[in-house]
Amino acid sequence: GPRALRVEVRKSVWLLGEARQCKSIPKACVPCRRNKPKVMEQIMGQLPKERVGQVLDQAVFSHVLIDEFGPILVRTGGKAKGETAKRWILLITCQATRACHMEVMQDRRAEEVVKALSRFAARRGVPVEIHSDNAREFVAAADKINKQHDAEPAPRLTVAEMNRTRWTRYPPRSPHFG
């Protein structure tokens, strides 16, 4: 760097304005610039309003992200029988506090997603907005919730209330949205 260059120059000669000269040489030297590249910073976008400032105004889990993972193998029927079954987990995350809630689903059908959301709403309250990806079961569950409100009695009280919930889907191949 400039200091090391000044030390080496001072060993043989004394220059006037050496500090300025020693600072400008490494800037013009191509190998020096390659050895010490400028660090780039990531430009961050603005966080959505659901993620910032909503904690004091609204309840926890009022704006949620949902996703699923699995299958995981669980033992059904106790230790003696040793039968296993596949189960999926619906992961529900609060956008403001990042608190997580998990619900077990028997399979990946839309009915199971509706049941899991119904259990979630009974425990944590009906969310104002749900964000999800475009998975088949999430799209079908959103349609089922909207149609079920008018057509038939809900399996649980909260499904009828969930008709007021806005459901936002992220575009395909965009993991940075959630």
Image (tube, rainbow, N blue to C red):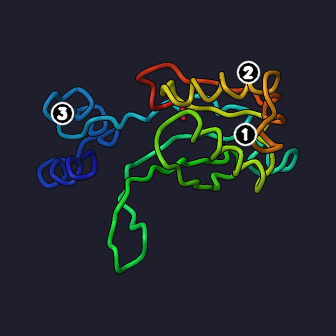
Q: Residues within 10 Å of mark 2 (few under 14, many from 20)?
A: few
Q: Between residue 132 and residue 139, name the one nearer to us.
A: 139
Q: Residues within 10 Å of mark 3 (few under 14, many from 20)?
A: few
Of mark 3 and mark 2, the one earlier in the sequence is: 3
Of mark 2 and mark 1, the one earlier in the sequence is: 1
Task: Residue at 78% x, 44% y: name it.
Answer: 156
Q: Is residue 55 above or below residue 44?
A: below
Q: Is residue 104 above or below residue 165?
A: below
Disc 3 residue type? Answer: Arg
* Numbered disc in front, either 3 or 1: 1
Disc 2 from disc 1: Cα separation: 22 Å
**Spot occupied by residue 11 in the image (x, y as percentages of width and height):** 14, 55
In the picture, the disc for residue 34 is: 3
* Numbered disc in front, either 3 or 2: 2
**Spot occupied by residue 29 in the image (x, y as percentages of width and height):** 18, 29
Disc 1 residue type? Answer: His
In the picture, the disc for residue 63 is: 1
* Numbered disc in front, either 2 or 1: 2
